[in-house]
Amino acid sequence: MTDQSPPEKPPGNQPRLGEVGLTNYAPYLMNRIMGRYNASLRDEMAGLGLTTPKMRALAVLSVIDGPLIRELAVYSVVEQSTLSRALDQLAADGLIRRAADSSDSRATRIFITDAGRSTFDTLWPRMAEAQSRMFRGIPDDERRAFVGTLQKMLTNIRKHEI
Amino acid sequence: MTDQSPPEKPPGNQPRLGEVGLTNYAPYLMNRIMGRYNASLRDEMAGLGLTTPKMRALAVLSVIDGPLIRELAVYSVVEQSTLSRALDQLAADGLIRRAADSSDSRATRIFITDAGRSTFDTLWPRMAEAQSRMFRGIPDDERRAFVGTLQKMLTNIRKHEI
DNA sequence: CAGATTTAAATGCATTTGCAAATATCCCTG
DNA sequence: CAGGGATATTTGCAAATGCATTTAAATCTG
């Protein structure tokens, strides 16, 4: 990849970040916003004995019933090995339950317990608040359009994912 | 904040995540998209001896000249202690330079070196590509609106930040 | 202006992370 | 149906992370 090799795609040379500016580079803005969102929940989670991976797993499990661990890893955006250990802790705390898959004995399905659901229910209002704060002063239709764009983006990056 | 205390805002009780659905909860979508974006750059960065914190610091420094470390931490979305150590490595590799602030001898300002700029220039095309991939098939005006909303969101969460 | 308080940055340390390898099982091919 | 990959999950281990503390310097207060 030397300075002389032609770019892979036609669009010519990319503008420099300096020209785009940080605040016009979407991934930067998104990382910054999510950094704050995640940090704002950390304290609340710590009070419930949860970490980010544990919370994300619970959140997904509150919506999706009995996924495989590898599916849960994708949905909850947590590395598989990290998730494996997070699940150990959640199981030890009785918030989830591992169950052997009926047709594939390599696989494990994860189910949230009543205790897990109740823990998540304690946390959810804070997550909803955090979202409201993010969107404060942004009209509903703009918000809807924004989420619509996010959904398209997820489809784009999902190529080889679940 | 018990179940009886009135909510801060009129909208009554928050809907459950189950009702909203993961794919209508913006923070979930954003975390998932950024997880993929960050992962897609990790290999490229590893080849340049960079980690996510180091890359973020370089990216910000390519745009903002000589910030204080604490400012750089905010802009680059990296914990101050993590950044401190990332800067050690970047300095050892000659990609940045620490310089005592002239008016406050507690403070340190960080400057990117030519080598640092050139390393970042190698990485930037991949970052730009990653962004293009995210936005594939999304029309320009929708993209602009999306970034506009992100900027509003950044303002919202920025309350006590820089 | 002395003492208390705040602020900037670095560091100690226990925990967390993620890559790579190990383990167990499944599936495909000849 | 045996053997050679795939695939699901866990685990070993070194490195990275982040909280809390330390150090040093600035600023506020009476």
Image: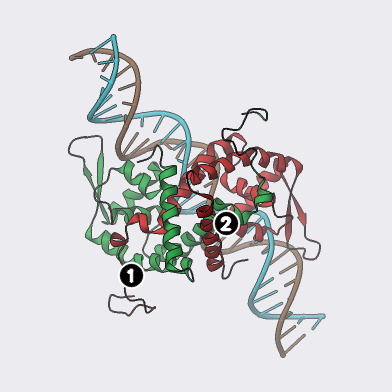
Chain colours: A red, B green, C brown, D cyan
Placement of the C terminus of chain B among the 4 image quadrants: top left
Choose between A151 and A63: the one closer to the eye.
A151
The lab-note entry on whether marks 2 and 1 share a chain reads: yes
* Dot 2: chain letter: A
Q: How many marks?
A: 2
Please tell me whether mark 1 sits on a helix, a strand or a loop: loop
Residue A33 locus on image (x, y percent): 45, 49
Residue A114 position by quadrant: top right
Q: Are marks 2 and 1 in contact (CB under 8 Å)?
A: no
Choose between A154 and B108: the one closer to the eye.
A154
The three-letter amino acid code for the residue at tag 1 is Gln
Residue B23 locus on image (x, y percent): 61, 57
Residue A108 position by quadrant: bottom right
Specify the label residue A79 is tagged with.
2
Residue B24 locus on image (x, y percent): 60, 54
Q: Is residue B3 left or right of residue A77?
A: right
The three-letter amino acid code for the residue at tag 2 is Glu
Q: How packed is label 1: few (under 14 Cα within 10 Å), some, or many (20 or more)? A: some
* Dot 1: chain letter: A
Residue B87 locus on image (x, y percent): 32, 49
Please tell me whether mark 2 sits on a helix, a strand or a loop: loop
Residue found at x 65% / y 51%: B20
Q: Which residue is mark 1?
A: A14
